[in-house]
Amino acid sequence: MPQPRELIAGDALKAAVLKYSGEMRQRVETEQGGLLSVFDGWFTRVVSRLLQFDPARSWEDSVRDAAAGAGQALDLQWDLFRLRQFLDRWQQGRFVEYAEREASAAFYQPRFGTEFGVDVQLTCQGAPSLMRWRGTALMKNVFDFAMYPALIAELRPRTIFEIGSGLGASAAWFADTMTSCGIDGRVHSVDLRRARVEHPLVSFYQGDCNDPAGLFDAGLLQSAPHPWLVVEDAHHNVAAVLGHMQAYLAPGDYLVVEDSDVKRDVLRAFLGLHPGGFLVDTRFTDNFGRNATCAADSIFIRTKQATAAPEASPHNQPTAQ
């Protein structure tokens, strides 16, 4: 487990504020028509207050002293901490090593590595009823409901492999999202029991994660057009499943491991076998706050050429629905 490190502070914090402020102003002007988002407005207000302190001192010292002498500055302590959290992860860049993500997790909710509490995690799929797609319960949380369309729109995957169909709603949702983006693609989804949902762009299969090579026919894995989005959502024999699928991934493909808070040991071991082969894409893990996704630190882009895939064989060829 990587050792925790210090959160950004002092002159480094001030420099990061100046750099981000410039990027924010350009984005607001060019992409948002001059309109500030809620976050943009908060950032601007907090920085304006901090700039009123003695420039020769650190903001941490100034805010601490002000809070000790006047109750009105107590809220600024919270603002400053959240500002430091945001800029600390922002300056890491978009693509980050998994170990670096874990090293900076000490400043967040310990189980999920997010700034949200457990209460949000418990209810973000819907409570007491789930979200639905095409009339079927959709086992995705509200953050991922916004994250996946953004990922699909940018990646433009020609093929999506879903390991863990559940009721089948998510596969249909993936397919509909590709269609809405004008992507000519197909979804292949597998589970221990084949889903009963029907969709013209989805092939459902029956397979067992205890036999990773039998989840999808090797011929399909060798011929399916890239780029790929591979979603692991079965939670069984995860190490072997990831090890099998990674052999077919090409640079630029994405691998998403859902509900990864309980799979961290597996992910460390898997990534240790493929050093430099996968990076966390923080554009999608952190767009709504650090790890505002069920795939905490586990939305990966393949960065190196995959190892040679096994030869195609007639072993356990699934039947598409």
Image (spheres, rainbow, N blue to C red):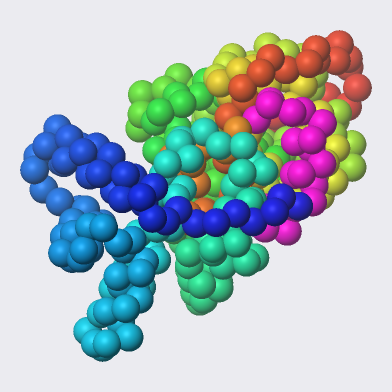
Task: Kindly indicate the quadrant of the structure image that contains residue 118.
Answer: bottom right
Q: Residue at x 56, y 67 (%)?
A: 109
- Determine the residue located farthest toward the left in the rendered image: 34
Task: Locate residue 307: give its quadrant.
Answer: top right
**Residue at coordinates 42% horizontally, 56% vertically from top-left?**
9
Vertical side of 281 occupied by 66: above or below: below
Task: Please provide percent x and percent y for residue 113.
Answer: 58, 59
User: Which residue lies at the image location 60% right of the left edge and 33% below the top edge?
Assistant: 279
Q: Nearer the viewer, residue 79 or 300?
A: 79
Q: In the rendered view, does 118 fall on the left or right side of 181?
A: right
230 and 23: which is toward the camera: 23
| Segment colored magenta | 260-278
Extreme residue in the front direction: 56
* Residue 284 locus on image (x, y percent): 46, 42
- Image position of 38 with respect to 152: above or below: below
Find out whether residue 276 is within the magenta segment: yes
Q: Is residue 15 above or below residue 259?
A: above
Is 313 left, or right, of 234 in this rendering? right
Q: Is residue 203 visible?
A: no
Q: Is residue 256 magenta?
A: no
Q: Is residue 95 left or right of residue 29?
A: right
